[in-house]
Image (cartoon, rainbow, N blue to C red):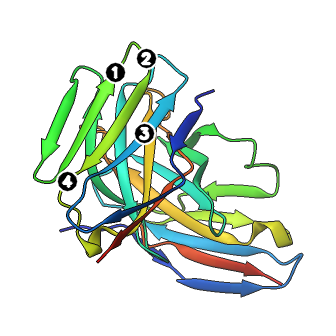
Amino acid sequence: GENVEQHPSTLSVQEGDSAVIKCTYSDSASNYFPWYKQELGKRPQLIIDIRSNVGEKKDQRIAVTLNKTAKHFSLHITETQPEDSAVYFCAALVTGGGNKLTFGTGTQLKVEL
Amino acid sequence: EPEVTQTPSHQVTQMGQEVILRCVPISNHLYFYWYRQILGQKVEFLVSFYNNEISEKSEIFDDQFSVERPDGSNFTLKIRSTKLEDSAMYFCASLDRSDNEQFFGPGTRLTVL
């Protein structure tokens, strides 16, 4: 089955700096890659997603890149703010069938003032 | 905006007791999911449900677990005889087939004593 690895497990940046989180996946059939932000005790919230027919997607300060050949995808947050502090999870999914999400292990992002 | 809802928000039970976690997916969604998140760990897939039957289940979803859609709105997860290691946050999610975004409920925190 699909295996998603995520790095780093913790990331501390200064306010205004950029943050990059990287994930790799194992199943070449995976074709949908969402990123979730989870605050303590809350549900995962989708912040951006990318499909396998696209190499990059941007939404204001957040961007995601996908390299299908290497089977990795990355989340980029620019101009970080304290409210960006949270745990971020990447995930991969194969559309069709059960459409189950396989999550990465999470990255605790801390944005320091 | 429609949301997935879950009840209860917190359930405390004794080891060996049965629990039922309830979810109301978004009304026009067709796929339903349960995920589990042990404190401090990643979100793990348990089961997917479509057309009134299980479409996929993980190794975690053993004979102690069952799911049901007893009416047109509720989706339940039953754990027959709870173990200490079942303590986790349980998230329900639903999916509209026209897109891949899964919408998560707020979760039920299950504590097994």
Q: Residue extending furthest right?
A: B16
SS for callout 3: strand
Q: Which residue is mark 4?
A: A78
Q: Verify CB contact (< 8 Å) between mark 2 and mark 1.
A: yes
Q: Amino acid at mark 4?
A: Thr
Q: Do marks 1 and 3 share a chain? A: yes
Q: Residue extending furthest left?
A: A60
Label located before the other in sequence (4 or 1):
1
- Relative to A55, A29 lies left or right: right
Image location (x, y in percent) of residue B58? 68, 41
Protein chain holding label 3:
A
- Relative to A72, A5 lies left or right: right
Q: Verify CB contact (< 8 Å) between mark 1 and mark 3.
A: no
Q: Which residue is mark 1?
A: A67
Determine crowd level at label 3: few under 14, some 14-19, many 20+ residues with C-alpha closer than 10 A: some
Where is residue A67, by image quadrant? top left
Residue under the point 19% across and 53% down: A78
Residue under the point 15% across and 54% down: A61
Determine crowd level at label 2: few under 14, some 14-19, many 20+ residues with C-alpha closer than 10 A: few
Q: Which residue is mark 3?
A: A22
Image location (x, y in percent) of residue B67? 63, 56
Q: Do marks 3 and 2 share a chain? A: yes
Asked whether residue A39 is in view, the answer is yes
Q: Which residue is mark 2?
A: A70
Residue under the point 72% across and 75% down: B19
Image location (x, y in percent) of residue A96? 41, 26
